[in-house]
Amino acid sequence: MGGTWVDWLLVAGTGFVAFHGLTYRDKNGDRPWVHLLFGAIALLFCFRFLLHDILQVW
């Protein structure tokens, strides 16, 4: 367990991108598919960095 500060920085960065991508709405209240796509991809990478590099579960 542990991880370097770079691992924690990547988890925070990809987590922020995932949160923004999955919760973004435009002026009309619609969710563009590109934001959802990149938000989902960022969420997968966030979980990958957290589980593999920091917690060493996977």
Image (spheres, grey):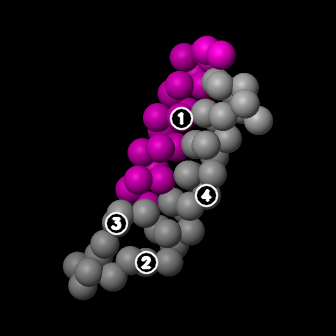
**Label 3 or label 2, whichever comes before in sequence order:** 3
Residue at position x 58%, y 22% in the image: 6
Q: Position of residue 27 (x, y in %)?
A: 23, 79
Residue type, numbered disc 3? Tyr
Q: According to the image, label 1 marks what residue? A: 11
Look at the image and tell me in which quarter the C terminus lies.
Answer: top right
Q: Are marks 3 and 2 in contact (CB under 8 Å)?
A: yes
Q: Toward the viewer: 56 or 36?
A: 56
Q: According to the image, label 3 marks what residue? A: 24
Q: According to the image, label 2 marks what residue? A: 32
Residue at position x 47%, y 44% in the image: 15
Q: Which residues are magenta?
A: 1-21
Residue 53, image quadrant = top right
**Label 4 or label 3, whichever comes before in sequence order:** 3
Magenta-colored stretch includes residue 13: yes
Q: Position of residue 44 (x, y in %)?
A: 63, 51
Q: According to the image, label 4 marks what residue? A: 41
Left or right, 34 with reference to 30 = right
Prevailing SS of the magenta stretch: helix
Q: Are marks 4 and 2 in contact (CB under 8 Å)?
A: no
Q: Position of residue 57 (x, y in %)?
A: 72, 30
Residue 36's label in the rendered image is none
Residue type, numbered disc 1? Val
Q: CA distance from mark 2 to mark 1?
A: 24 Å
Is residue 6 depicted above or below 36 in this figure?
above
